[in-house]
Image (tube, rainbow, N blue to C red):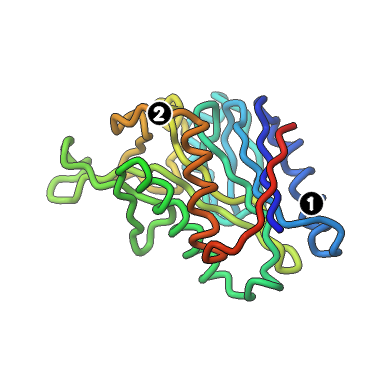
Amino acid sequence: MVEWIRSNQLVPYPEALQIMEARAAAIFAGEADEAIWLLEHPPLYTSGTSAKPEDLVDPDRFPVFAAGRGGQYTYHGPGQRIAYVMLDLNARGRDIRAFVKSLEAWVIAALAEFDVQGEIRDGRVGVWVPRTDKPPLITGALAEDKIAAIGVKLRKWVSFHGISINLNPDLNHFSGIVPCGISDHGVTSLMDLGRNATMGDLDAALKATFARVFDQGRATVTTKIP
């Protein structure tokens, strides 16, 4: 069983880390179900294990937290849907590459519910949207923007951290970092792409597509709203 948890208030990042780590330990011990936690954070930057100090352009803008996940610098804030994914890969197959590909496929499937074409790129983490309506940042390159970030950590083959999808955050807040170490492309959101969706709409899309990607429609899902 996968429990879906939705927080309606902004969750401080240190609190979220503690809750995720405790839940992952309980899942490994067989004391809790797997979980997907949907939430938003107050404005902040996180650094992954590959973060470069020079990519933190404006260190005094927002609080900066060491996340312990893979990846580089990422912005989180209101208007961005975070989905922390606490799944037991002991039961789902101990294949981290396949797991990350499933996360990518999940994001792409959810975006398709809003008629947005999400794509992945070799050497670039996350999900990208081709842009025919704007010039590229580099002459001769394809114009495309990042709409979702992915960063996970495993402990005893139980995952935590997860994905973030930009619904309608303040995109200017990304300018305080080099997002995921990539400066040649921009950042976008569903609102920036002209999709007038709500957070509830995005949550519904994530729930509708999760089982399709991870469990081929066989998941039993419960919902809890603290």
Q: Horizontal and vertical percent for residue 181?
A: 43, 48
Question: Which residue corresponds to the image point at 82% horizontal and 50% vertical from the top-left?
Answer: 22
Q: Is residue 43 left or right of residue 8?
A: left
Q: 133 or 6: nearer the eye?
A: 6
Residue designated by label 1:
23
- Determine whether 178 is above or below 162 in the image: above
Image-quadrant location for residue 11: top right
Residue designated by label 2:
171
Q: 111 or 139: nearer the eye?
A: 111
Question: Which residue corresponds to the image point at 57% horizontal and 27% vertical from the top-left?
Answer: 43
Q: Horizontal and vertical percent for residue 171?
A: 40, 28
Q: Horizontal and vertical percent for residue 32?
A: 82, 56
Q: Amino acid at mark 1?
A: Arg
- Determine whether 162 is above or below 14 in the image: below
Q: Helix, strand or loop at disc 2?
A: helix
Q: Horizontal and vertical percent for residue 147?
A: 39, 42
Q: Quick one: quadrant of the N terminus?
A: bottom right
Image-quadrant location for residue 33: bottom right
- Determine whether 200 is above or below 17 in the image: above
Question: Which residue corresponds to the image point at 47% horizontal and 65% vertical from the top-left?
Answer: 101
Question: Which residue corresponds to the image point at 59% horizontal and 31% vertical from the top-left?
Answer: 44
Q: Is residue 116 left or right of residue 87?
A: left
Counting labels gives: 2
Q: Helix, strand or loop at disc 1?
A: helix
Q: Amino acid at mark 2?
A: Leu
